[in-house]
Image: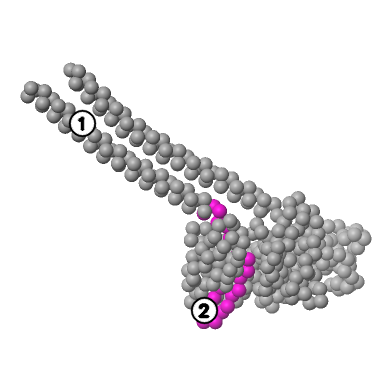
Amino acid sequence: MKKGISEIVAILVMLLIVSSIGVVIYTYATGYFSLMSSAITERSKLDINTIKEKFVVVDVIINKSNNTEICAAVYNYGKTSIILKSMFINGTKAITNEEEIFPGEFKWFNGTINMVIPSNTTIDLKVVSSLGNYYETVIFQ
Amino acid sequence: MKQLYSNKGVSTIVGSMIFLSIFILSITAIIIWTQNYVNYAENTREELEFMIEKSRENLIINSINSSGKLTLAINNPTSQTIILKQIWANHSFQLGEWIIPANSLVYINTTLDYVNTSKVVTSKGNIFSVIPKLEGIVEKGKWYVQWYNLSDRRVFDKNIGESYWYDLCISFDWASSITDPVCGPYTQVGFNATTRIIALSSKIYINWYVGEECRIIVREIGYDSDWQDNLGYVELNVTQNATYTITILYSRWTGKAFLTLNIVNADFAI
């Protein structure tokens, strides 16, 4: 009788241990796979948005006083909205405000640097979006 | 013993269920991962198609002054329809949608004031310019050459035509005697070639070997070589990356007609 009870107890204990380990593994696996799936999905969305993002600088106005202000007309010819983050003028980061441009629209994107660029020289202008795409152009003034 | 067999069955079922669940989860993750890559590949393919269509766009544009307003004569020589979204004249613009059918010429009347420099932007993001004109029709990336029949040495009095040269280095070697015409029926000829260059260094060197005479003028720095014969060179102090307008005059009266002219540390201005 005693032997029978200990067998049952042992089996129950074993079942409990195996089930606990199984539940732990299952929970970990569920979390891991769902995290991995969402990360892959997010990354894929980001990659797709990056390749869909298309813009071009169609016109540039240069204003000079104590510093140089560059107004770039940026046209979004892609299918997704773009957010313009920064502008580089001859490699120097300009002071800018973020601009969102919807598909098929264009907006003026302004940047200022604290230096005067001499006349009759070239300006290397680079406009960068939030997804890291950029458009670079050289302006002869 | 009977009890043992029974419990073994339960644990096998529990184990199998856990294994199956994890297996299904991993398969689901693989399917999601694959599907995402399929989506990415499909989008990449669409974007490549778009880029190909974009690169096929081409327009030939001439601007017309219509009572002070800008009219564009736009020729679409391609086999695809092109949609214009913006027209720019200097820094003024007009928005709209103008359809240029394949292989056709379309006139667009704008509300913009006529200026020498204008451009259009297509729906696919291409920009086509009416190329800025200097001294008549000097265009970017080439020499604009006006040909003359000379009534005397260095006297450019009868224009006989025009052409373009696409190499910054000029080199030709024509007839050997005065009796051979060097340009159509003309024996005494000259030309006036003008282009815009960008300085790649703070010094530009121009060397030449000419028969009979040439003259080099760089407008922005006030340089004029005066008429030169035989061979020579000049060293010019310029600003790096600045653009300059350079004009070459050539006059041939009776001698052998040839010219080799090379410009070092410069390229066509874009």
Where does the image place residue A74, in percent across and percent down from the top left? 59, 66
Residue displayed at 56% across by 73% down: A70
Please name the predominant secondary structure of the magenta segment in the image. Answer: strand
User: Farthest bottom residue?
Assistant: A65
Q: Determine crowd level at label 1: few under 14, some 14-19, many 20+ residues with C-alpha closer than 10 A.
A: some
Residue displayed at 79% across by 53% down: B103
Chain letter of disc 1?
A: A
Closer to the camera in the image, B262 or B184: B184
Q: Determine crowd level at label 2: few under 14, some 14-19, many 20+ residues with C-alpha closer than 10 A.
A: few
Image colouring: one colour
Q: Which residue is mark 1?
A: A15
Where does the image place residue B257, in percent across and percent down from the top left? 83, 61
Residue A12 falls in which quadrant of the image? top left
Residue B190 visible: yes
Q: CA distance from mark 1 to mark 2?
A: 77 Å
Residue displayed at 52% across by 46% down: B40
User: Any magenta on residue A56?
Assistant: yes
Looking at the figure, which quarter contains the C terminus of chain A? bottom right
Where does the image place residue B113, in percent across and percent down from the top left? 74, 76
Identify which amino acid the numbered label 1 is placed on.
Leu
Q: Which residue is mark 2?
A: A67
Looking at the figure, which quarter contains the N terminus of chain A? top left
Q: Considering the numbered disc 2 on the image, is that residue within a helix, a strand or a loop?
A: loop
Chain letter of disc 2?
A: A
Identify which amino acid the numbered label 2 is placed on.
Asn
Span highlighted in magenta in the image: A50-70
